[in-house]
Amino acid sequence: MTELSHLPLAGIVLCGGQSRRMGQPKCWLPWQQTSLLNFVVSQLAPVCKPLVVAASADLTLPDLSSPVIVQRDARAYQGPLSGLITGFAGVPSEFESAIVTACDLPFLSSAVLQRLSTLWTTCPADALICSDGVRRHPLLGIYRRSVVAIAEQMLAEDQRRLLDLLERVKTAVVPPEELRAVDRELRCLRNLNSLADYAAALQQATQSP
């Protein structure tokens, strides 16, 4: 078996959603003196290259400080399963695996991503995702390119849930204690679905490092 530690990781950021509850594209939300998308990309950049941003065809993206490949959805608003397919379409073929995140993770950190990368070096699964002990978080994980064929079959069957994909492939789950070593409060798993979520995150960010 190939030593996984010698295989580099690409990075994929999904930002193709309609953001109905937020009322505006999440990728443009101001965060840490930049846009939320730029912040997420900046956390990925030290850990994986190349970086792919998967976005809907009609979404204007903010300027990014790190080089990225922008890959547009062939069909808009089909959910994160479609976004995963789109993202891997932009990843050069020599990359077998990619860290996959959403664009609305304001407390994501390179330390968390590095921990996932380290765990992946000995992981025999098709996907490695995070958990808070109650819920699995498929939009903070690592996926092999081999899952794309299954994802495409699911979309053809009008199945769009990323969690359902994880039931069809060999999936490993990072227990919360692994993440707590680098993120004690598991803030990396917190995403933003509404303006109220965003306001609460801004307040928390000013209260603690």
Image (cartoon, rainbow, N blue to C red):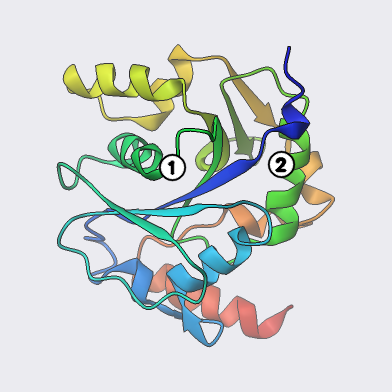
Where residue 164 appears, as percent x and y from the top left, is 39, 22
Q: Quadrant of the N terminus?
A: top right
Discs 1, 2 touching: Cβ within 8 Å: no
| 32 w.r.t. 158: above or below | below
The mark found on residue 91 in the picture is: 1
Q: Residue at x 38, y 25 (%)?
A: 148
Residue in the foreground of this view, choosing between 159 and 185: 159
Mark 1 to mark 2 CA distance (whole Å): 17 Å
Tell me if residue 148 can be seen: yes
Question: Hey, what amino acid is under mark 1?
Answer: Val
Q: Secondary structure at mark 1?
A: loop
Where residue 78 appears, as percent x and y from the top left, is 21, 40
Q: Secondary structure at mark 2?
A: helix
The mark found on residue 117 in the picture is: 2
Q: Residue at x 62, y 79 (%)?
A: 205
Question: Alpha-carbon neighbours of circle 2 within 10 Å: few (<14), some, or many (≥20)?
Answer: many
Where residue 66 appears, as percent x and y from the top left, is 52, 70
Tell me if residue 135 can be seen: no
Q: Residue at x 35, y 68 (%)?
A: 26
Question: Mark 1 or 2, which is nearer the eye?
Answer: 1
Q: Residue at x 80, y 40 (%)?
A: 178
